[in-house]
Image (tube, helix red, strand yellow):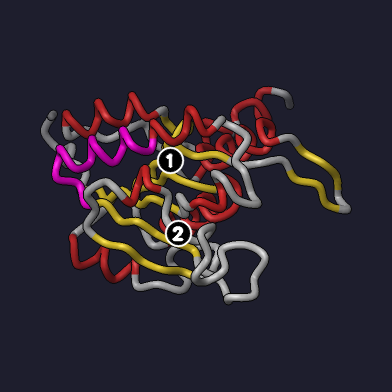
Amino acid sequence: MPDGVSYPRRALVVVDVQNEYVSGALPIAHPPLTTSLPNIAAAIDAATAAGVPVVLVQHVDEADSPVFAAGSTGAELHEVVASRPHDLVLTKQTVSCFASTDLGERLDDLGVDTVTIVGFMTQHCDESTARDAADRGLIVEVLSDATGTLPLSTPSGTISAQELHETSLLVLHSGFAAVVPTAVWTAAVAAGEPTTGADLWASTEPARAAR
């Protein structure tokens, strides 16, 4: 690596890869699970091979919750992550992985400067965690095809899973995270190299050009 460029000290944070999003009440729609789950597995395998710490985060709510209820099958980690080597499992009750866990302190103890996010949902726990990580001064990476979401409908409108996923990633890449496919990331990890990060100034070029 060229002089002056430091090697990333990464941790892979695997967010809420639980049965609820696969066979439960909140089935991930885009990218399809046939894409995201194998890529999550590939990311964990690449991290393990490179000595990158793997942190599994599991969302658990009260026992009477309609989703992620304590003790339910839906709240259990999916086998694609539970069966793979990992360094730590944290349980959260909030959207961001930082807010209700000691993830920040754990990353500090490991000397981590770069957090890579995979898992579910793109615009919810993934995005919230990415923003919190960036605010903590960490470099953030989000793997575009190892994350995913489902369609939403609120009084404000309706959005498809694909549009929601792609829009959320566009916003993240504009100022908070490097958004890359899993294959690009695994190659970077193997080489000990960084990925291309967020650039708010470059992202706002269309607005300036239109004046």
At 65% from the left and 29% from the top, the residue drawn is 208
The residue depicted at 18 percent of the width and 61 percent of the height is 110
Query: Residue 12: x and y, percent?
Result: 31, 48
- Say few, some or many: other residues with alpha carbon within 10 Å of mark 2 (under 14 / 14 to 19 / 20 or more): many
Amino acid type at mark 2: Glu
Determine whether the residue tagged by mark 1 lies in a helix, strand or loop: strand
Disc sitting over residue 80 in the figure = none
Residue of label 1:
142
Does dot 2 land on a helix, a strand or a loop?
A: loop
Instruction: Let me know if residue 200 appears in the view.
Output: no
Quadrant showing the N terminus: top left
Looking at the image, is mark 1 or mark 2 earlier in the sequence?
A: 2
Check disc 1 and give the amino acid type: Val
> From the viewer's perspective, is 20 left or right of 83?
right
Q: 7 or 42: nearer the eye?
A: 42
In the image, residue 88 lies at what x, y percent?
26, 61
